[in-house]
Image (cartoon, grey):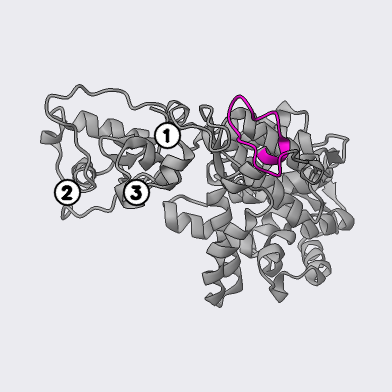
Amino acid sequence: MICSYTDITHESRSELTDPLSILLEARFEPCQVCGEQSSGLHCGAITCEACKKFFLRSINGEDQKYKCVRNKDCIITRNNRTQCQYCRFQKCKTIGMTVKEGAEIQQTPRVADIFAQISCYVCQAPSSGIHFGAITCEGCKGFFRRSIKERAPSRYKCMDNGTCEINVATRNACRYCRFQRCIKVGSRIGRQSNLFKHHMQPLSAIKFAAYRVACKLRILQKYLKLTYVDYNILVRAFNTHQLHFGVETSIITYENARKVLTAIYQLISSYHFNESTMDEVIDTLLRLLCEILHIKIDEDFDLNAFKIILFALSNAKLPEKYRCFFRQITSPNVIASQGKLNELFEILLKLPNHFDNVDSFHPDNIPGCVQSCLDHTHDGIIREDIFVNWMGREPQTLVWLPTLHRLIATETGAFI
């Protein structure tokens, strides 16, 4: 059975009980047991692979060995889920995980296989995932991307007053009606950052500016899955595309930036990242980078800015970020000039200023920030270790970055 766009949109949400519909309803939901990125519907609940396998082991008699050394009320998270098997199993049962008696335990279908059973919202071909906000096939995904990139929709004309039927056989006959169908089913590009602003609006009540900015960046980091992108992933992706520290080029084209981001997300474990949403996440991130750096879609990126923003939003440890910042602006030299520090701070401050207006993080404070770093030296020469040590003192203009890491630490229990 292939579910169509009409079937799904006409169905009451309260009546969605089959796996396909639940996947559509909760495709961005975390694991109901530990909060990890879910991989699908398993044993009647939305869980990650680890909790699915734990439950299947437990129901085969392993649970008889489980003991809780506390009060049988342990809070189960991604980081502590292996510490109390008893409470983890109780959580599995509480959320309704079950296997029918006598039923054969089968491998849950891959997300890609499930999407293949859902028809493309545009042309009714088997879909391949969520692209630009709608479930579509590869053909309609590519058509919508080309239309936006080439600014072509204004040139599309329909010879039949916009009434053409769009299906697998006719989708190439009328580009106007096909594009209008894309828009109707929810395909979009360029509006994604409004999603962040919607979730960030309640945070405006937070009085402490650094914490307010950190909370907003944390929302951004989670939505873009950058919380799973560490130092090693970034360096591997950059080096694969010959963008190592010290590279002579000063720009990266929009298409090459897309290739780098694709390489980054492909290095993330499938347990953490659903590949069916990769295109949408990459397009959202590219659009956001254009907004933050004040450039138009398809224009070249400044390479330093592109890499520094990604390092800042990644899950790399703070000292790793500081060293990456320094090496990006100084390689192949080993010291930083005042001009290079100015460039670095201008790039970094684009992040908080894109989401918030804070006097402390205004670019007017950059000269004082540079002077503070110079005052930290003994001979006026800024070397890497001196820069990292100075950043560790959390200068006021950049304090939002270590605050972000403290916020992450409170959520995950990880060291910053």
Residue linked to disc 3: 77
| Res. 232 visible in picture | no
Tell me the magenta residue range. Answer: 160-177
Q: Nearer the viewer, residue 286 or 166?
A: 166
Residue linked to disc 1: 3
Expressed as whole percent of the image width and height from the top left, the position of residue 96 reads 21, 44
Query: Tag 1: Cα neighbours inside 10 Å, few (<14), some, or many (≥20)?
Result: some
Q: What residue sits 15% from the left and 27% below the top? A: 60
Q: Is residue 299 left or right of residue 12?
A: right
Q: Who comes first in sequence, dot 2 or dot 1?
A: 1
Q: Nearer the viewer, residue 298 or 74?
A: 298
Residue linked to disc 2: 69
Expressed as whole percent of the image width and height from the top left, the position of residue 95 reads 24, 47
Please tell me how many numbered marks the rendered image carries: 3
Q: What residue sits 72% from the left and 76% below the top? A: 359
Main SS of the magenta part reads: loop
